[in-house]
Image (tube, rainbow, N blue to C red):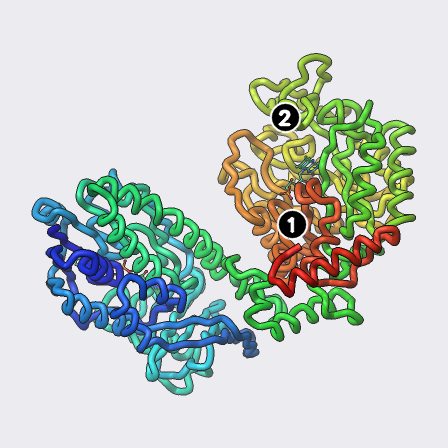
Amino acid sequence: MKVAVLGAGPAGLYFAISMKRRNPAHQITVVERNRADDTFGWGVVLSAETLDNLADNDPVSAAWIRDHFAYWDDIAVYHGGHRTVSTGHGFCGIGRRRLLLLLQRRARELGIEMAFETEIDDPRPYMETYDLVVAADGLNSRSRAAFPEVFKPDIDVRKCKFVWLGTRQKFDDAFTFIFEKTEHGWVWAHAYQFEPETATFIVECSEETWQRFGFGDMSREESIATCERIFARYLGGHPLMSNAGHLRGSAWINFPRVLCERWSHENLALMGDAAASAHFSIGSGTKLALESAVALADYLHSESDLPAAFAKYEDSRRVEVLRLQSAARNSLEWFEDVERYLGLDPVQFKYSLLTRSQRISHENLRLRDPAWLGDAEAWFQRRSGNADNVHRTPMFAPFRLRELTLKNRVVVSPMAQYKAVDGCPTDWHFAHYAERAKGGAGLVSIEMTCVSPEGRITPGCTGFYAPEHERAWKRLVDFVHAETEAKICAQIGHSGPKGSTQLGWQKMDAPLPSGNWPVMAASEIPWSPANQVPKAMDAADMALVRAQFVASAEMAARCGFDMLEIHAAHGYLLSSFITPLTNRRTDRYGGSLENRMRYPLEIFQAVRSIWPAHKPISMRISANDWVGDDGVTPGESVEIARLLQAAGVDICDVSAGQTSLRARPVYGRMFQTPFSDRIRNEAHMATMAVGNIFEPDHVNSILLAGRADLVCLARPHLADPYWTLHAAVQMGDRDVKWPAPYLPGRDQIYRLSERNATMGMRV
Ligand SMILES: Cc1cc2nc3c(=O)[nH]c(=O)nc-3n(C[C@H](O)[C@H](O)[C@H](O)COP(=O)(O)OP(=O)(O)OC[C@H]3O[C@@H](n4cnc5c(N)ncnc54)[C@H](O)[C@@H]3O)c2cc1C
Ligand SMILES: Cc1cc2nc3c(=O)[nH]c(=O)nc-3n(C[C@H](O)[C@H](O)[C@H](O)COP(=O)(O)O)c2cc1C
């Protein structure tokens, strides 16, 4: 096969090598605009694992690369002049120039032709003369630009400015992050040694800080001198160096996240950064490039023709790329928002930095550096007021709100059971909630319990509006208090436009086949074309519903609930006021956020005035309508939280969505936790996180990174009422309290777990 490779970066060279290794008869030419030794950049990070994979593909180049690897195990963070170090991270790196020279040597040895100093303006002439053309011409690929309609590149230019520099100062004991506060804002550096004499020193800051410094108007020398001044106390008098002469190596840029919809066209395939890029802060760009090169070479030899090989290449690499780009997005967003975290305690800040991509979990950190993690856990326990038993994981730290102390941070999230009869909880509810209270969670919330018959979502929803409701709920609360250490929270709400609908396991949110009752909302906007058009509430309706909320809260107080939560999320009545998607009012309850929040806050104030002063109140909100700027955005939810906090709400239960059929949520593990993180660290309000959190590891990492104060689990508690007790077994925590009659069961599961742990299994 006659092959042209456009670009002699890691992707292009390694693809050429991989092809030639599979069949020496291929005629391969690599075309590159730069001179052979004229490469930009400093060090790149790879992992030992990546190199092992490469050794299977080409042992010769892998051995050469390994010979030049710099290894480092520690991560050091300077923050506020403070240095903290943790170990066990296991990176390795190599100079980019060294890597490319090794790959060029190997290519030459295999008989690959290389044409340097040859600019490619258009891939088409190559496509006409070669059987196969691989475009590995980097982030700003001209080959990609030649067929925009085919490749449909999605290029997301990120917010921070960065410049890739080098230094002779030694950073050889740790991969080092330095955060410096300057007169113009925070500036930070990512520094790592890759050769005995040289370290990479990437300087990064927000666009605003960059503007305030006036970097845009500075010459390269002035820019570097300014960076030297900012980081003077870390540089030991050594200058910062730019790869002058190459635009990308020395200029400030914004990182462009590239992802193409298609990666091939006719006989042309995109590879490496040209097809998909990954932010440098997770050090995976070169890994992606090298592994894609191997994959395409493989498929070109296993498949019968080019289209089949390209199809397999795209399919297999896209999954890996999306996985890495998701981790890279978490990581780069952390740096973009770093000013949110710089006020955290240095321990929490470091933990947040280490877990930013969400690829490193709590238990993963324990494997890497048990001593550091142990200290961090002890810090968390002490800060939670638990000085006696500092060796427990964050999940088992107490939490206090007003006079309420929870024994741990796990919450059974409210979940409608649809088993009530005329609003009255039944034995189902008693058995269901009693089991969960025995299961070890610190707080159990009952489902949205409605303030009136018309305020129910479905005919199966529970209420707080009749004497028999009070008797049934009180029986449950008394049991929970008498027999368990759990606290119990009453969630109260009104269904608004989503009322008069079918049970959860029937046609959710669809009107009843018969016996519908009238519904009301902020405006006359039905949930769907099939739902009733709600009545827009007038002053009398608002006064009535307010009084119903107060009467329900009074009932919950008489029952002895420890905490109250007002449901203002998920498109129900109060949520219909908050989101502009369903609030079209022109009075003082519509328009600005302050107006849209007015009625929910009036309800809160009325309820707060009768709710016992020593007990807390939470409010659940949808922090993202998932429709972009037309609805509530995570940014606006910070403003919502500020209003809640100013009104005296003790904690914000941060849910999202279910406010519009237009919503396009992005699901994933812990997918709503970023909204809680933002509210907690920007509005400085206590939060609960919820949404696809299902591992003890998730709970611990959310808490220790300061992304929430409490963690709600809903569906995991449907599958396992004893989720918390089982989590303790899994983590080896022996300090949780089991109900006395269950102690023999506890002892057995502890024994089994210890036995299995020694055999490397999990209970
Ligand atoms: C600041 C920074 C730090 C990074 N750190 C790391 C890291 O630690 N670890 C890691 O794995 N990755 C890192 N990367 C990413 C890494 O550099 C790239 O992902 C990787 O180099 C991609 O390889 P590539 O071959 O696709 O593209 P490139 O390395 O960009 O190579 C493209 C080649 O094509 C040539 N070319 C482009 N256009 C033309 C043209 N018109 N005519 C002729 N030739 C052309 C270029 O000169 C270049 O040699 C970092 C990137 C940056 C910006
Ligand atoms: C069956 C079921 C019923 C629910 N009912 C309520 C409810 O009454 N009130 C509420 O605020 N959220 C309710 N939710 C949402 C959950 O509290 C939680 O926010 C959501 O399920 C995401 O958490 P998870 O991923 O842990 O399940 C319900 C969820 C489920 C699965």
Provide the secondary structure element on which disc 1 rests.
Answer: strand
Q: Quadrant of ligand 2?
A: top right
The residue most toward the left is 129
- Residue 175 position, x and y percent, is 45, 74
Rendered location of residue 405, percent (x, y): 82, 57
What is the tally of numbered marks visible in this picture?
2
Residue 684 vs 478, above or below: the answer is: below
Between circles 2 and 1, the one closer to the viewer is 2
x%, y% of residue 473?
A: 87, 36
Identify which residue is drawn at 73% across, 55% down: 409
The reply to whether residue 635 is visible in this rendering is no
Where disc 2 sits, the SS reads loop
Q: In this view, does 530 lie to the left or right of 92?
A: right
Q: Is residue 213 visible?
A: yes
User: Within the image, what quadrant is residue 603 found in?
Assistant: top right
Residue lying furthest bottom in this view?
A: 237
Give the image quarter of residue 464. Answer: top right
Residue corresponding to mark 2: 508
Query: Distance from label 2 to label 1 (Cα)?
Result: 24 Å
Residue placed most toward the observer, 320 or 205: 320
Q: Which mark is residue 689?
A: 1
Give the quadrant of residue 105.
bottom left
Q: Residues within 10 Å of mark 1 (few under 14, many from 20)?
A: many
Q: Is residue 212 left or right of residue 458?
A: left
- Residue in the picture at 30% in, 47% down: 313
Q: What residue type is labelled 2?
A: Met
Q: Nearer the viewer, residue 82 or 548?
A: 82
Q: Position of residue 109 (x, y in %)?
A: 15, 69
Q: Which residue is drawn at 42% across and 86% down?
A: 236
Side of 291 where 30 appears, left or right: left
Q: What residue type is labelled 1?
A: Ala
